[in-house]
Amino acid sequence: MNNHLLKIGFLALFAFAVAATGCRKDDDTENEVITTVVVHLKSTDGTFDRRFTWNDPDGDGGLPPTVEDITLAPNKEYNAEVHFYDRSKSPEVDITEEIEKESDEHLLVYRVSGTLNLTITPTDTDSKGRPFRLKTRWATGAASTGSVVVTLRHNPNKQLPNLDQTGSVDAEVEFPVRIQ
Amino acid sequence: MTVQAARLWSAAWLVFGGAFWLKAQHCDIPLRGAVWNADTGEPLPYASVHIVGTNRGAITDEQGTFIIRDLCEDSTYTVTVSHIECDHETQVIRLVENKVFHFYLHHHILSEVVVQERAVAPLPAQASEALSGEALTQRQALPLGEVLRQLPGVAVLNTGTTIAKPVIHGLHSNRIAIIANGVALEGQQWGAEHAPEVDPFTAQRISVVKGAAGVRYGVGAMAGAVVLEPAPLRQRPGTSGWLYGGLNSNGWGGTLAGAADWKPRRGALALRVQGAAKRSGNLRAPDYWLGNTGLEELNFSVLAEGKTRHWRHETALSRFAQRIGIFQAAHIGNLTDLQLAIESVTPLNNDNRFRYDIERPFQRIRHYTARHRASRPLSDRWKFSTQYALQFNLREEYDVVRRTGSAADRPQQRFRIWTHMLDAAVEHAPIYHWEGGVGGQVLYQYNLVGRGGLIPDYQSWGGSLWWLERWRHFPKPWELELGLRYDYRRTAASTTGTLFNVDTTVHFGGLSGNLGVVRRLGQYTRLTLNTGYAWRPPHVNELFARGVHHGAATYEEGRPDLQPEKAWNTNLTAHCERQQWNGTLTLFRNQAQNFIYLDPQRTLVLTSRGAFPAYFYAQANAVLYGADAAVTAPVSGGLAIEARASLLRAYRTAPDSAENIPRRDWLPLMPADRFQYGLYWSNAPSAGSNATHPIPQTYARLTGSTTLRQMRIPAQGLLADAPPAFTVWSLEIGHTFPMRKRPAQSLETGLTARNLTNARYREYLNFFRFFADEPGLNISLWGKWHF
């Protein structure tokens, strides 16, 4: 009886070992990396249409990102649209569609720094009529230089007055801007 | 002497089994032993052990152990073991040095005393602490780290309220070993936010070995080890077990645990089935709820023991499964978020309400262990044993993501690690007073990390050989322990991800050694000096990690050319125990060479979420030294004063003393000095007094714990500024109801209140100290029914 039970014990151990080891080896983790931010600027008079890219295809660390300087003409209005991509994968993933689909859970924040004569005003709202700012209008003033920091916030509380500081940062990139 | 009297004496000699033969022999051997409840397998405190015909005797302590000193070697004694509501029963034993005598008593049928002799496992000469009995039962429903928090020299590294890692003398993670039921736990210990995957309910005794313990517990045990031992299985046929139920006011949590032991009437098989389930919702700090701090846990284990003619087999299977919420407000995207969070008095983005649901971010953990041990005597003195253990550890981390179809239920990080370990050892009973053994281990590890993980996939092969001996010759007040071990580890790391590529093999080998000396001073005092040399290979994360550490908002990068870390650790312990007085003082110094740490860089790493301060793994020499002390002093009538202190200083020398960086710098995240003080009252007599006494009925313990502000922090780096000093009070009350009709059964109940004053405080050793206060008052009510 003893040996019998011991054998059962061994079999159980073996079965357990197989069960523990025989797990799926496929990789189904999901990691979304925003490697690339594109600001698409079109002047309202139709004379200017350019994309400016902030790009870090190897992700955090490694090679430093490359950034294109934005050069704009003074006293003009531009329609701006921001796009987000994951270029660590092939083919690249356009994350902008997801952001637009869940516009109520996202918010873009623009910070103009330096002596830059630039005013950014939103031209869109989210699915609930609250700020979203994926699409904006950039109005330039006199010639000047500085930069624009574009931040994508996730799960902000859009009911609060300090909504720009709520939620967590999904992306934050800085573009040098020159108005000349 | 009259003839009659002489006859009477001869009769007495016969009755007493021929005790007190006068021989030319050493008569200062102690009789060491333990009394167990054969029905529950638990130790039996306050049992009286008496040597018939003498006035010599002892009462067992909380762990059921006793010692009667100054007896004669190779003599036969008649020993009476008794417990309340039982008749005195006797058993004849033959006293041999270095034997521990185990007495298994049935609560109600004492006539069937079972004596089992076992060779003593030499006590480590190292400083150690242990938790068992009521002190363990009071905390058993907590995670392992929190269970050990009160012990001198032990601190806890927290990531929020749900993740706790034990810290021994300032070191943790890869620098300590966790031994659960004879198997070294292998998971993702490298991560500060990866709590050990063990259930304290599986243990009857948890000990903490302080100081380098590499010889005994393998590479990695540079700072010590945590050892969990289950209760012994039933020795006699029958069934027994316990059932535990507990409720917590903070988090409205509940715990249900139990174990059932069975030994059939025929055959040499004994079985135990054990399990524990926990559920808890959001915890509350004094001023607000801590969003998403719920917990779910479901653990099982099976233990079996069997004997064939020569072999003794032991099989253990266990499963640990946990889902733990991570405080939502601690989820930050970048440095700006962190700055905003630090500046805010109450947590930003906090889901300030009570709920049980666990949302992202959370961790899902599974740990399976299967182990088989077989041993057989080779001769009177020699014993062979072998063990195979398989462990599988799964760790999934679910981060906050945009909720799209495909990503909705997937984790962002997944680690899977399989570990096979095969051990073999030959041990011997004393030969010329030397007792010990030699052994070896082979290990294979396969670690699979999902795409985008912080560390690469890797495979490890390893082997080790050890030799451990201890010299004891009782009348001499000296004891000696010597140990030597060689370990080899080879690791092949590679990544399948696209973000960074590693494909390399590293290998390390090294010796560990240990020398311990014990000196007894009189009957009550013991001095122990232990010096050990231990090493550990740099872990894969230290070699190859690359990425942003969320929560800390730092960018961390490994260094592939790191050298093994080595430590020379010396402990001096004085232990004194006299009547109800009890005091221990440990002084320690740990000198580490090539100590691996995260070195703050002066550059920022630009990522798509903004700039992060960079921390690169670096090596330097480090020194950690300090003292632990504990005193128990009786006042009167079962009341005693308890006091404990843990002090630590830890610094490193800078490898290249660049401008502004001092030559010496404090190590980050070291426990601040801590003082504990309180009162303990019990209506039970303490061990040491004679006569038969009832089992403990009621006890109460009030403890205050003051942690000073950590002033010794690194000159540079983000993790600066420790929170101010704080004091937390706790109260533990316990009462045991004996079952009058069924003496083998009892109901143990308790009421525990932690953070009694609902104090608002933050811990330096909690990564989430930037975001929220520690939990407030928690009252738990529990009951444990032994059947």
Image: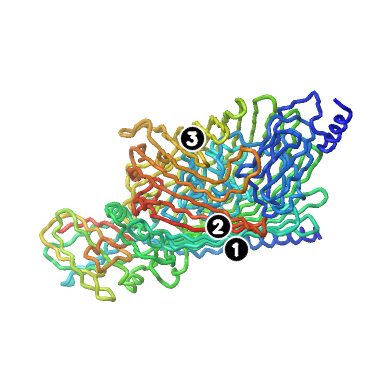
- Residue bearing mark 3: B629
Residue B224 found in image quarter = top right
Spatial distance from mark 3 to mark 2, Cα to Cα? Answer: 40 Å
The mark closer to the camera, 3 or 1, is: 3
Task: Check disc 3 and give the amino acid type.
Answer: Ala
Percent position of residue A74, x then y: 12, 62
Chain letter for mark 3, please: B
Q: Residues within 10 Å of mark 3 (few under 14, many from 20)?
A: many
Which quadrant would the C terminus of chain A be assigned to in this image?
Answer: bottom left
Q: Position of residue B545 (x, y in %)?
A: 46, 49
Residue underneath mark 2: B416
State whether residue A38 is above or below residue B754. below
Quick one: SS at disc 1? loop
How far apart are the alpha carbons under marks 1 and 2? 9 Å
Verify CB contact (< 8 Å) between mark 1 and mark 2: yes
Q: How many neighbours does mark 1 have within 10 angstroms: few (below 14), some (14-19), or many (20 or more)?
A: few
Q: How far apart, in angstroms, are the residues tagged by discs 3 and 1?
A: 48 Å
Q: Answer with mark 3 or mark 2, whichever residue precedes in sequence.
A: 2
Q: Nearer the viewer, mark 3 or mark 2?
A: 3
Identify the chain of the residue marked 1, using the numbered disc in the image: A
From the image, tell me which residue sits under label 1: A23
In the rendered structure, which amino acid carries the disc numbered 2? Arg
Q: Quadrant of residue A162?
A: bottom left
On the image, which quarter does residue B433 sit in? Answer: top right
- Mark 2 is surrounded, within 10 Å at the Cα level, by few (under 14), some (14 to 19) or many (20 or more) other residues, namely many
